[in-house]
Image (spheres, rainbow, N blue to C red):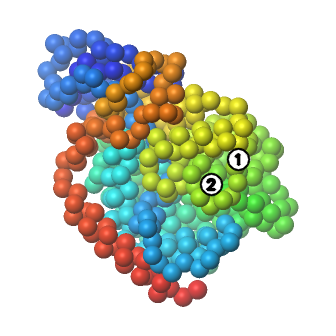
Amino acid sequence: MITLIKNATAVEFEPSSVKAGVDIVVEDTLIKEVGKNLSGKYKADKVIDGTGKLVYPGIVCSHNHFYSGLARGITANIKPSPDFVSILRNLWWRLDRAIDRDILYYSGLVCALDAIKDGTTAVIDHHASPSFIKGSLKTLKDAFEKVGLRGMTCYEITDRNGRDQMIEGIEESLEFARLIDSEKESGSNLVETHIGGHAPFTLPDEALRLMGDAVKKTGRGVHVHVAEGTYDVSHSHAVYGKDLIARMNEFGLLNKRSIIVHGVYLSDDDIKIMNEKDVYLVHNARSNMNNGIGYNEKLSLYKNLALGTDGIGSNMFEEFKFAYFKHKDDNGDMWPDSYLKFLFNGNDILERNFDGKFGKLEAGYKADIVIADYHCPTPMSGDNLAGHLAFGMGSDTVKTVLINGKIVLEDGEFPFDVSEIYAEARRQAQRLWDNMDDLKD
């Protein structure tokens, strides 16, 4: 299958560049060639006129929670929550206990649909459903593949519901990694996995040891929330007498495939360990603001930094803007070009975890591509591209999306009827909210 995108303006985020009059040839899952006047060189099965359009590599959301997709506008009875741990106990730890297979599947579907509409072609997900552990990751994988979204998912290992569920989370993680490995030979796999964990304050030494064993067995990295609030840090010092990352490092959890999420209150020594281990920090500005946990003033100290949403959708244009403006509100010294690099870095995380190259419009790269209808009111170049994203361009410009070489959105429409999916999602959302109210503390 050959797809030709003709006469587009090709945009790349890192290094920033804007080139007009470019043809892009996609063959199967990869970009075959990029250049001028290629239409006579190939017999295309599909031709897309890119005249007046921007074409750029797909955007990555580097941390998300698809299990929370049906929480929007929630009317379940939520107790007052004066601090972050109360928010976890009263809202999120009740919501995840109320999830069953159908709720999860439709939450995954609508999150995947919304991601693609926003021009996000890959999502790195982090999952929890204590009442439905075994088979939960396969259910999310089915949702990703139904819609055609690329990404990763993992199970949130934790002892907060007892040791048996902690062990079941380990087993689900290992079983899912085996499933992914068994399907890799086709070369077209859309979904990969981490070894997931909630946060150090609900991960005793036994859990970290078992997670370390799973990392060795599977060859994966970990995906864990760390220092999202001050409680996580205080707990580690009080119970273990150690900094958070130093404790995790003792169990062999840190490698180049690992991502640490939030890190708002990590020490300089912990940041040094992360940098030495080539680990990514994923910053989630809107979630941090929503939960009132404070601002991470040490972002510039990290070797590897990417952007995620922590469950607040998959609109990375919004996340980019909020992250940058919050930084400036805190009198930070970085400019939009730094945040454009952080946005691009999700592709580096993909490359560390998938067999493939991501994030560029070049031959041999995965054909995850967005075609956008952005009418520039001012000249656009590589020098000011980040300014256009910060002060103008948004997800409303997204028109057509290719993932793994397949058109998954064309002129704003999916290749299948989504109305029943959203209708069923509304029914499942009400079930979820009712389930939450029926739970006993």
* Corner quadrant of residue 275: top right
Residue 7 in sight? yes
Q: Which of marks 2 and 1 is nearer the N terminus?
A: 2
Amino acid found under the numbered disc labelled 2? Asn
Instruction: Please identify the quadrant where the N terminus is shown.
Output: top left
Q: Is mark 2 on a helix, strand or loop?
A: helix
Amino acid found under the numbered disc labelled 1? Asn
Image location (x, y in percent) of residue 42 = 17, 18
Instruction: Please identify the quadrant where the C terminus is shown.
Output: bottom right
Residue 213 in sight? no
Q: Could you tell me which residue is drawn at 62 percent across and 51 percent down?
A: 261
Image location (x, y in percent) of residue 219 = 55, 47
**Residue 390 — which label?**
none
* Corner quadrant of residue 425: bottom left
Q: Could you tell me which residue is drawn at 19 percent across and 47 percent down?
A: 415
As drawn, the residue found furthest toward the front would be 377
213 over 388 or under it: above or below? below
At label 1, counting other C-alpha atoms closer than 10 Å, the crowd grade (few under 14, some 14-19, many 20 or more) is some
Q: Could you tell me which residue is drawn at 68 percent across and 72 percent down?
A: 82
Q: Is mark 1 on a helix, strand or loop?
A: loop
Whether tag 2 and tag 1 are in contact, CB under 8 A, the answer is yes
Image location (x, y in percent) of residue 387 = 52, 27
Numbered marks: total: 2
**Residue 288 — which label?**
2
41 over 153 or under it: above or below? above
Q: Give the residue pinned by disc 1.
A: 296
